[in-house]
Amino acid sequence: MKIPVLTAFLTALAIFPAPADAAAPQPIALTALNGMERIGQSEKPFGKPTVQLYAAKNEVESFQVVVAAPQHNLRIVDVTMSDLVSNSGARLDPQCVQMYREEYVRVRCSTYRAELPPGLYADPLVPFVNPWTGKPIEPFTERRERWGERTTTSGFDMYALPFDVFRGQNQPIWVDVRVPKDAQAGVYRARFRVVARDKKTAEIPVTLTVWNFTLPDGPTHRNHFGNFRSLAKSYDVKPDSDRFCEIEARYCQAMAEHRLNPPIPKHLLPKVNADGSLTIVPERHKALRKFMNDLHVTDFQVPNSRFAELPSSTLKPDYKEISPSQRAKAQRYYREFFNYLKQNGWDKRAYVYLLDEPNLRENYEQILVLGEMVHEAAPGLKRLVVEQTYPHDPSWPNIDPVVDIWCPLWAYIDRESVRAKIAEGDEVFSYTALVQLAPSYHPHYAQVKDKEPPSWHIDSPMLDYRVPTWINRQYGITGLLYWSTVNKVIDPWFNPAFPHPSHYNGGGLLFYPGTPCGFDGPVASMRLKNIRDGMEDYEYFVLLEKRAGAAAVQKIVDRIAPNWWDYTRSPEAILTARQELARQILRGK
């Protein structure tokens, strides 16, 4: 007897019923992203169902978890991660994990030549706990005990928990995992858990593979990221006051935690006397040595002598003249300062920043005067000039004899002249500022005039912040320079644009002020985290070169970053290449 098709279908459903929740959306949806991805607040959720991390010892690796509300609005009251435990039972200290709620900031007008449109962008990372007290940041509240009495307030505007996720929207959480130097190599597992007010929960598994090699404490890749002078105005404190020094120290620590050399605080340096000599104040020297050791500082910028300052913008008739008496004081200053550095082992990567962007013939003439003066006083002290490796104008003076470190903008870089400078024994840094295209005097202008290098703005892809160290390696460039991490913008949290005829969103701003979170100190950006990851990638290059030779590194770098314009746009390609670097490092042990 034939069974009707419909009857057979219903019978099958009765025998093999579908799971009740097979197609039903979960109240809380979690997906995992890597650190180079970014999700819009109202974008359809994407990502992976699990977190897969790989890290060396003494490295920080990050991931994101997107909390989405597919069915109805959510009130998230707790976010936790269980301890990372290895197959052998080894356990990482819970303090190794730091979590942040990603805040969305508004890009009102696009940056000049921006790759991405205006809108809301996740960037500031609001910590779950106050980094200086270790206590949770309480939400802002107003209350009064009785009607008619004065209202009392507590808490702060920006906090991590609790947070709301409206239906159809996302709230990403950023997680840093700092692998200790003494961690056992192996595979560690944990679970990331989110709890809503109605007690509903969601979890996502986390796997961390710790490789059996260790990154150095301080950055191998040289770097200069500006100073903190603007902090006094940002926090309404007097420059050089005790309170300013405390805030400055917090920013210095934050830079070091992201594998960047912090600017050396003025109050830690030797005292400069009226005749150019130095007085080594024991208390200052002790504090400076602690600063250098604790923050693993690898570069030392010698402050320019106040006795031989030449104007770089408004040029006076005597724009390149230094009186004999001032010259003698300046030379004594540089000689004694460099000797002080040698006595303490800080001379190898010391430099003086001679001049920034010399765009006039007169500036080239000033560089000759300053460079010769410094070299006569301290032949071992390197002289850095923020200029490309070919002349602005061939008719201008040749500054090559007095420059030891060249620093061209990314769009100005020319492979042949970079190689020539390195072959002569010079070093080359690279840097970015605002949005730059190749100049008309670039040796290969016709080929590169319409090409764009990475751009460091909020409305740029996150990958743009990670890939420059890969491109630097491609060219033999050993340093990275950026003009500021705390540049003044219209409003850091609500309109973080550099006030310029064109908007430069987040230009020179890698730290947000922590005041809305209840502390006078820095709040890191997602962009800064990606710079840190690029600095860590460079450590892999150095380790692999030591164990397998430069050619092994070059083969991998060629795939990711053949030049400043044709680098990969794929985060997965960088992560895959990083794993290959690690495998070859391990084979070479």
Image: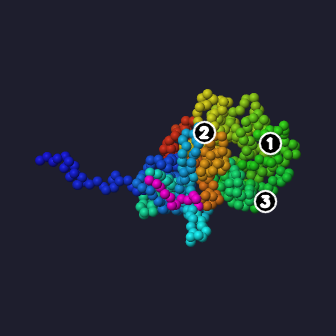
Which residue is rendered at x = 66% and y = 38% of the image? 408
- Residue 72's x, y, as percent? 42, 55
For the residues marked 1 and 2, what is the alpha-carbon distance in whole angstroms?
Answer: 33 Å
Residue 53 x %, y %: 48, 52
Residue designated by label 2: 112
Q: Is residue 71 left or right of residue 146?
A: left
User: According to the image, label 1 marks what residue?
Assistant: 310
Query: Which contiguous range is marked in magenta?
Result: 156-167
Q: Is residue 164 magenta?
A: yes
Residue 362 covered by magenta stretch: no
**Which is more toward the observer, 488 or 258?**
488
Q: Nearer the viewer, mark 1 or mark 2?
A: 2
> Nearer the N terminus, badge 1 or badge 2?
2
Q: Are marks 1 and 2 in contact (CB under 8 Å)?
A: no
Mark 3, residue position: 281
Quarter assignment of residue 471:
top right
Residue 14: give x, y in percent of width and height. Answer: 23, 55
Can the viewer see residue 216?
Answer: no
Kindly identify the amino acid type of the residue bearing the numbered disc 3. Val
Residue 306 drawn at (x, y percent): 80, 48
> What is the tally of numbered marks visible in this picture?
3
Tag 3 secondary structure: loop
Q: Is residue 296 left or right of residue 212?
A: right
- Given the image, on which type of amino acid does mark 2 rest? Tyr
